[in-house]
Amino acid sequence: MKTDNFEKSLKEVCSLQETFAPEIYHVLPNDWWVVVTDVKDSTKAIEAGRYRDINAIGGSSIAAVLNAVKPQKVPYVFGGDGATFCIPPDLIEPVKQALKGCQDLSEQTLQLKLRVGLVPVSGLSRPVTVCKYRATPSLTQYFFMGGGLEEADGLIKAHDTYSLPPDTLSNADFSGFECRWNEVPSSRGLTLSLLVKSRLASQAESYALYQLVNDKVFELLGGVHDHHPLNTQGLNLSMKANKLAVEVATKTQNQSAWRVWRMRQMIRFQNLIGKVWMRFKIKNQFGDWGCYKTDMVTNSDYLKLDDTFRAVLSGSPEQVNDFLAWLECAYQQGQIYYGVNSTKAALITCLIAKTGIEHVHFVDSSEGGYAMAAKQLKRQVAAKNSPSLLV
């Protein structure tokens, strides 16, 4: 098999339960690359209230990379303040150029520094294993195990040698990227960004552990309709300039202030039309707008595996307390490390392949989301300094 056919060769699974079975994961070819993006000093930006900008940068980098590799598809995962991609050797150059464009956008428009690192799979001591989960006809997710992604992330943050060369040509296409929805209040009181990391000795045990965590989500927070972080009643398009800023920037990079203003007004007009179509359940060549919010909920990546169990969840304060108590017990028993960011709303960043018809949505919680949850998890790792940690 040619390595550039690896993604096509992955068997799709359509049940979340199947993603916890090790036999459906496949080892990433040795000549591929792991590419990681994340916002530097994200904690300071979060403290300044810029968590929406941080999430949007992560989403825009996904749009840029997926456009750069078309018509091929590559495995990737959204991580809140960035994203991780698995790239075949023949596509690494256009991906570098796309991500240099993301760095330029982030720094020049938002004054935030986007770190981009590239690690050859051949340089990793741990494998990257991948499965392809077809959650809906429009939403394909890639789940990762093996420890390789986490190793790559650590190398990139520790060594500048893996950084994207500063003289890389900048050439990013952000087509399809949208960030125009208000925060989505939890219908049940609280929204959590959750990270759970196995401390068990073997991969087989870790798969079983993540299955148990998923089971506990259903047991303590309820079924998908109950624990899902999005709800149709809470979905509302924004008209505010600060909430449309990143999308406007991707569409007007290096253009005049007049063009920036005009683009902002155009997006506001599109949002107004969308509000009308959704309210009156209009059907047209752009889709069935009475179902659009329901489709948004369905096509969101609220739960995944990337060497960590990662989810954004909703629950009542009582349910969340019960769930956190179970997590703390598992932590004290030496089974897991975990991090949680608890707020009252979710954030959405969107990737629109076909308006009204084919769209996917990346979800995090407000006020820091996954980035703040990761801080707690790292503190637990540092405090325990366990030699049995599986990384």
Image (cartoon, rainbow, N blue to C red):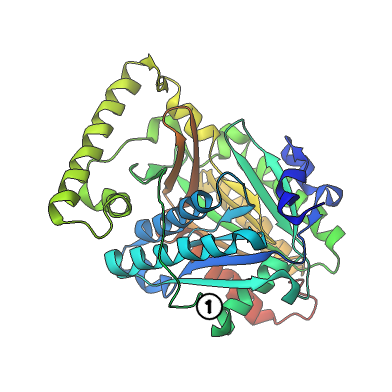
Q: Is residue 180 left or right of residue 207?
A: left
The residue that label 1 is drawn on is 163
Answer whether residue 337 is visible to the viewer in this image: no
290 w.r.t. 266: above or below: above
Q: Residue at x 85, y 69 (%)?
A: 201
- Quadrant for the C terminus, please: bottom right
The image quarter containing residue 147 is bottom right
Q: Residue at x 40, y 50 (%)?
A: 174
Callout 1 environment at 10 Å: few (<14), some (14 to 19), or many (20+)? some
Q: Residue furthest left?
A: 258
Which residue is more in the foreground, 73 or 218?
Answer: 73
125 w.r.t. 370: above or below: below
Q: Position of residue 233 (x, y in %)?
A: 39, 30
Which residue is more in the foreground, 100 or 318?
Answer: 100
Answer whether residue 259 is visible to the viewer in this image: yes
The image quarter containing residue 309 is bottom right
Q: Is residue 72 left or right of residue 244?
A: right
Q: Position of residue 164 (x, y in %)?
A: 51, 74
Q: Position of residue 24 (x, y in %)?
A: 82, 47
Amino acid under disc 1: Ser
**SS for dot 1:** loop
Which residue is more in the foreground, 353 or 195?
Answer: 353
45 w.r.t. 77: above or below: below
Q: How many numbered tags mark residues here? A: 1
Q: Position of residue 242 (x, y in %)?
A: 24, 53
Which residue is more in the foreground, 187 or 46?
Answer: 46
Q: Residue at x 84, y 52 (%)?
A: 22
